[in-house]
Amino acid sequence: MDIDRNKQERLRSIIEDFTSVSTIPVILKKVLMVVEDENSTAVDLEDIIKRDQSIASRIVSVANAPFYGRQRKVESISQAIFLLGFDMVKSLAISVAVFSNIIYKGRYDIRALWNHSFNVAIASSLIAEKTGRAGMDSAFLAGLLHDIGRAILLQIFGDAYFDVSASGPEGLLEREEVAFGAPHTLTGAWFADKNKLPESCVKSINFHHEPERCLPDKPGDKCRALAQIIHIADVLVTTDNKGYEHDCLPSPEYDGILKTTGLKEEDIAEIQKRLDSMKEEVRNFYFL
Ligand SMILES: [Fe+2]
Ligand SMILES: [Fe+2]
């Protein structure tokens, strides 16, 4: 397929300048500005988050989620930053701000995408725990943000994005590329990169549909292992999530990927069971 380079460049610069897109809410702009600024500290982030009750309460409740296995109850943003770490809170703030503040009232159900992302985040961290091939935190974050490109494309293109995604998962990435200049995978990776998320997170967003294309840059680079985990989680959650017109078919290498991770059918079944038991809990996050 020929890639329209001009279109791709245009989209890339929109994503790079996402904070200046007039349709994004002030709070999201502020969060993004803080995380983009190399000199910003946890206190700057805390200051912004504290002023937005809906973002603050979501972050605190995510920090307290039982699946997350914290021993101590998190009661404030400063405590969340202390217990979860700056990177984690930064990424939670980005995802909560992007998802809950998107000004898009079209036909696409943004809550379904939020729900899907949360489920993939949980499934990813459970798979990371089971296989020991990535940290639970990084798997959770990459899972939470894996489809952030879809949320951003929706924000920018509105129902035009809905129309492209509505025809189903077959060939979705190609259709997105033709229509907008880049698929949601690359769009999300640009956004994550611009916001200085860890490289393994950026790469696994980029390759979550085709982890076999994720090539390590240097020895010891664990990006592919993380991309594989996100892919398995995505396929697992998609299978279960019939109401969501999703996006990710198993890669042609899927069986090989499962083998590499050492996951057995009974492990998958167990993870599925744990996900099912958390359904209510997950609903509470995006309906807060
Ligand atoms: Fe996706
Ligand atoms: Fe997905």
Image (tube, rainbow, N blue to C red):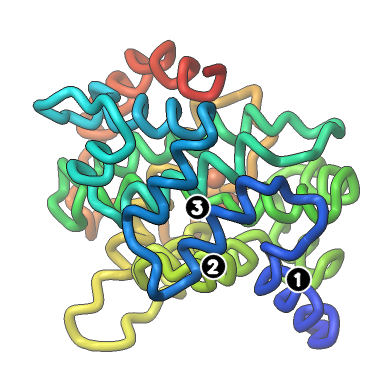
Q: Earlier in the sequence, mark 2 or mark 1?
A: 1
Q: Secondary structure at mark 3?
A: loop
10 Å neighbourhood of mark 1: few (<14), some, or many (≥20)? some
Amino acid type, label 3: His
Quadrant in the rendering for residue 83: top left
On screen, residue 29 versus residue 269, left or right, reads: right
The residue under label 2 is 189
Instruction: For marks 2 and 3, give the CA distance.
Output: 9 Å
Could you tell me which quadrant the N terminus lies in? bottom right
The residue under label 1 is 14
10 Å neighbourhood of mark 3: few (<14), some, or many (≥20)? many
Q: In the image, which is nearer the foreground, mark 2 or mark 1?
A: 1
Q: In the image, which is nearer the foreground, mark 3 or mark 1?
A: 1
Q: Secondary structure at mark 2?
A: helix
Amino acid type, label 1: Ile
Mark 1 within 8 Å of ligand 1, using the beta carbon: no
Q: Earlier in the sequence, mark 3 or mark 1?
A: 1
Mark 2 within 8 Å of ligand 1, using the beta carbon: no
The residue under label 3 is 146
Mark 3 within 8 Å of ligand 2, using the beta carbon: yes
The residue shown at (55%, 26%) is 241
Residue 58 in view: yes
Q: Nearer the viewer, residue 108 or 92?
A: 92
Q: How far from the left and from the top, in percent, is residue 81?
A: 27, 45
Residue 210 in view: no
Q: Is residue 203 above or below residue 284?
A: below
Q: Secondary structure at mark 1?
A: helix
Instruction: For marks 3 and 1, give the CA distance.
Output: 19 Å
Q: How far from the left and from the top, in percent, is residue 195?
A: 50, 67
On screen, residue 18 versus residue 209, left or right, reads: right
